[in-house]
Image (spheres, helix red, strand yellow):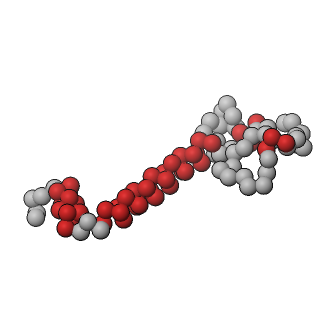
Amino acid sequence: MAGTSLGARFYRQIKRHPGLIPMIGFIGLGMGSAALYLLRLALRSPDVCWDRKNNPEPWNRLSPNDQYKFLAVSTDYKKLKKDRPDF
């Protein structure tokens, strides 16, 4: 047991306990979903500024029709009008 690799031990445990397969699948799915959501937040959110020299305030460049929220239940972004001044 001391000389076996991690993959071989993992395969042996799965072979002994097949009930672990769905649990490992759901944990992997949850971790993948969380990673993709964090990536979406980092790339699409106006609160995150990656380039301070060329775009110091990215939230000022958003038009009222830009939907940056993941889920908007009652807001139709196509019908919104501009209600703030230009800077």
Left or right: where does residue 38 sit relative to residue 83? Answer: left
Vertical arrangement, residue 49 with respect to residue 7, above or below: above
Left or right: where does residue 74 sit relative to residue 42? Answer: right
Left or right: where does residue 4 sit relative to residue 86? Answer: left
- Which one is in front, 58 or 31? 31
- Classify residue 62 by image quadrant: top right
Give x and y (percent) for residue 47.
67, 47
Numbered label tally: 0
Give x and y (percent) for residue 19.
30, 68
Vertical arrangement, residue 69 with respect to residue 12, above or below: above
Vertical arrangement, residue 77 with respect to residue 12, above or below: above
- Which one is in front, 54 or 82? 82
Q: What residue sits 17% from the left and 57% below the top?
A: 8
Question: Can residue 1 be seen in this snapshot?
Answer: yes
Vertical arrangement, residue 84 with respect to residue 11, above or below: above
Q: In which quarter of the image is the C terminus?
A: top right
Question: Can residue 47 be seen in this snapshot?
Answer: no
Left or right: where does residue 23 sit relative to residue 4? Answer: right
Q: What residue sits 37% from the left and 58% below the top?
A: 25
- Classify residue 27 by image quadrant: bottom left
- Which one is in front, 59 or 69? 69
Q: What residue sits 71% from the left and 39% below the top?
A: 58
